[in-house]
Structure formats: C-alpha cells, structure tokens
Image (cartoon, grey):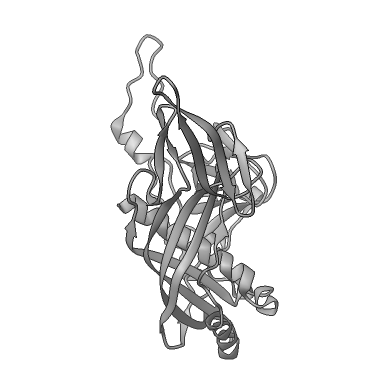
Amino acid sequence: MTQLSGSFAQLTVAHVLALLQADLPAAIRSHTLMGEYLPGLLSQLPFISVTATAKATRAAGLGGTVAIKREVIDGGLVDLGYVTGTNGECEFTLTLWAVTRPQLEEVRTALEALTWVQRPLERAALANVLNRTTLLRCRLANVTATIVAPLPPAPPSVTITANNTNLRAAPAADAAIVGQASANQQFELLGRSADSAFLQGCCFNGQAIWVAATEATTPIPVATIPVVTPPPAAPLAPADVAPVADPVLANAAEIDPGTAIVATATTPVITAWRQDLHYVAHLEVTQEPITGAGELIQELQITRQLGANGQIFDTERTRLLADEEVIVDSFS
C-alpha cells in the first residue's frame, strides 16, 4: 500500500500541474513558474509548487481493477470492455510565492477560478492501452493567510563551465579521472582543497569528485567554502604481498553530503509573499483498451454456436468502438 500511495501522490501532482499549464490564463501562465522550484532566485517569482498526499487508495483485483468483464476464450481469460486502474481520496496543496501582495492575489484569484473536475488527461500509453487520470471530485478546503516568508535557501552547488571537464578522485592535476562532465552540469558542493585549486562535489556514480576551480563556478566565495582534507593514500604494498583493504581508510574516504558543508550562511536571504491553497480531491487512474489506431474500445461481443459434436465455436467477434462496430478474427 505504501508504494501504491507514493505513486498515486505523484500522479496527482502530475495531473494538477498539467491542468495548471492548460487552464491558467495565458497572461499568468507566461510569467509564472510551476513545478521545478529553484530556491532563492527572486527573478523566477511568481511561483507555484504542488505537493500531494494520498489519503486512501483502492486497487481491487489484478492490475487494480475498477471495472471489468471477463470470459474464457480459446483457453484463456479475455477482458471484455474493461477499465483497470486505481482510485481514491487525495489532498494536494498549491504553494504560491510572489514578489508583491497584489501579484500573489492575482495568481490566487486565477487558481480559485479553475474548474478541476472531469478533465481526463492522457499519460504515456502502453501498447493497446490508454492511460488516463481524472479528478472526479475536487474542492478547495482551506486557504492560509498571506505571509511574508523567507524563500528556502538554495543548496550550494558547483557548476561546470565547459564540456568534457575531467572529474578526479583527488585534488590533484594528475589524480585518477573518474569521469567527465558537460557545461552547466551541477554537483552538490562539499568543500575545497587547502590551496583552493580544486572543488569537491557530490556525486558521480555515487562517488565524491574533485574538479579544478578554474573549470567551475560556485554561488558563494571560494574562501568561505570549508576545506576538505582527503585521506592519505595507502602505502604501496611490496610486489610479493597482496594488498589488504584498510577499513579505517575506506571509511575516511566516504563523504556524507548532508553534513559535509554548512556554507549557506553567506547566501543572502530573500523574502517573498507566500500563501497555501489546500484541496481535497478524488482521483481515478485508469487503463482502457484501444485499437492499434488509438480508438477506444467500448466493449467486445462474441457470437457463438453449438457445433454438431457438442463443441462451441465463434461465428463472429466484434469490437464496439465509440461510433462503429469492427468485426475481427482475434481480440489479442
């Protein structure tokens, strides 16, 4: 149920974001960022972020059946006019950030005017399956008071400035190259070498890396970045002695990205107007059968007769589509 709830919440966020992109007035949509928030950047405001929580989800039967009719045909189960998926109650919150209070109120007014329900949206489809999400019910449950609040600070990062930049295992020009990065690729900033010639970032293939300071930029002065002293290299073993891994050195080489740097104190704090809109909704996620041409199959019908030897055989198999019937040899 936990995995189902997590994916259900993600589908809710995706559905809400799609409706915002489609239904907000063009004048607001053109200058409002939605979905991917870049903390601390005043130039991106106004901004709308979306979070969701699945309160109760239901998936009954194989594949999460919502409604299904089945018969045994040719020795196997065939779905006749089926709709499978997940549905349930969910809550989602729209968090608004704006430079001024009038700007915040303009965006909020546009959001409150949206009609959320009964707007099916198609998602990435499997072969012969149409994936949809539909908000069957949705109501605005609560709007918090407008406040002036600090924007979450951006985590410090190291940004690569050129393509094919070498990422090294240690802060030295001749250190082993563990990979390469492209221009504008970012890594979480962990620290710098004592001479400030190299910056340490996280992570490449799960490993902390070093990059020359001349080949990257940081949002804070290099002098304010904590110095990271790499562990000493293990002594070379004699040729006739097999090397033995030193667990102490191995542990020392591990970097905890969450605690390795506390350099955000120098990042200027930006405040903006904020308001939260809380919604309660019922989302249905369905998979519906379609033909190879993408037409929705409403139902399948089979005409059968009893043969002279007591065996049952099909005389006609029909797919019922939205505006026509199609006779087919097989439903597979």
Residue at the far front in the pictured view: 308
Q: Nearer the viewer, residue 28 or 308?
A: 308
Q: Nearer the viewer, residue 16 or 209?
A: 16
The reply to whether residue 191 is visible in this rendering is: no
Residue, x 36% and y 19% (percent of image)?
243
**Looking at the image, residue 321 lies above or below residue 50:** above
The reply to whether residue 25 is visible in this rendering is: yes
**Looking at the image, residue 204 lies above or below residue 45:** above
Q: Position of residue 241 (x, y in %)?
A: 34, 12
Q: Position of residue 14 (x, y in %)?
A: 52, 60
Residue, x 45% and y 56% (percent of image)?
285
**Looking at the image, residue 129 lies above or below residue 73:** below
**Looking at the image, residue 275 lies above or below residue 189:** below
Q: Position of residue 28 (x, y in %)?
A: 65, 78
Q: Nearer the viewer, residue 126 or 295?
A: 295
Q: Position of residue 163 (x, y in %)?
A: 69, 43
The image quarter containing residue 220 is: bottom right
Residue at the far bottom in the pictured view: 102
Q: Nearer the viewer, residue 127 or 299?
A: 299
Q: Horizontal placement of 287 versus 41: left or right?
A: left
